[in-house]
Amino acid sequence: MNPLISHLMNQPLHREIMMKLSRLSALLLSGLLLSACAAKPKSDYDIGYDFSQLSTFIEFSPAQTNDPISSARIIDAITDALTAKGFVRDEGYPSFKVTYAFKVADKPKDSGVSIGLGTGTWGSNGGISIGTSVGVPIGSDTAKIQTIQIDVIDTQSNKLIWRGTDKFNFDAGGAEKAEDTAKTVTKILTLFPPQK
């Protein structure tokens, strides 16, 4: 090691600065990795359609579903999200109809391998380390992934004018899946109506 760098590393103030820089670097790297992993909803729409004319809606379920619990959760979440945006539910004369589709598929669980980045001191020296760990699989080796697609249809023309999709992972049903369903529907509908 360069004698000047070695001398600077042994000075208490420089050592403290290096430690803080190491911690900050680790935090920034972790934040970047987490933000890169976050899924974002996707949408597509009729670019010639005037979405400003929409004010009332009605939702309807697909003709056949083999999961009435998930179906009811999605309908409730659609209604809640659209009314929160100022749209009014109107069974008589809706300006648009909302329907949805969903599917559940098996997804291989994560490998259980993780990489860690850390800093520390030993005596008067500082350092950065990288380590790995391997998890021991417990239970099933697959998780489930639910994909939700929401379609908005113009009532007069009966044409699809907007479509949004997103997905989430789950291991079991119940309260956690209900919450994830509502969050996913809300995320999808943040893109509706589209901002041109």
Image: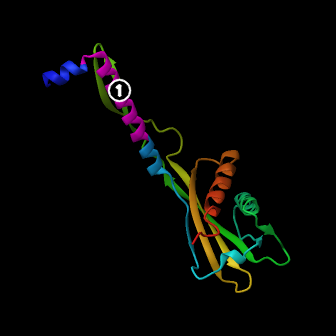
Q: Position of residue 23 (x, y in %)?
A: 39, 30
Residue 182: say if magenta.
no
Q: Which residues are magenta?
A: 10-30
Q: Is residue 110 above or below residue 161?
A: above
Q: Position of residue 103 (x, y in %)?
A: 60, 63
Pick whichever, 42 or 2, lies toward us: 2
Q: Quadrant of residue 68?
A: bottom right
Kind of residue sitting beneath label 1: Thr
Q: Residue at x 83, y 72 (%)?
A: 90
Q: Is residue 30 above or below residue 97?
A: above
- Provide the residue designation for mark 1: 119
> Would you say residue 167 is visible in this rendering?
yes
Q: State left or right for residue 88 relative to residue 121.
A: right
Q: Quadrant of residue 12?
A: top left
Q: Residue at x 65, y 72 (%)?
A: 151
Q: Residue at x 22, y 21 (%)?
A: 8
Quadrant location, the N terminus? top left
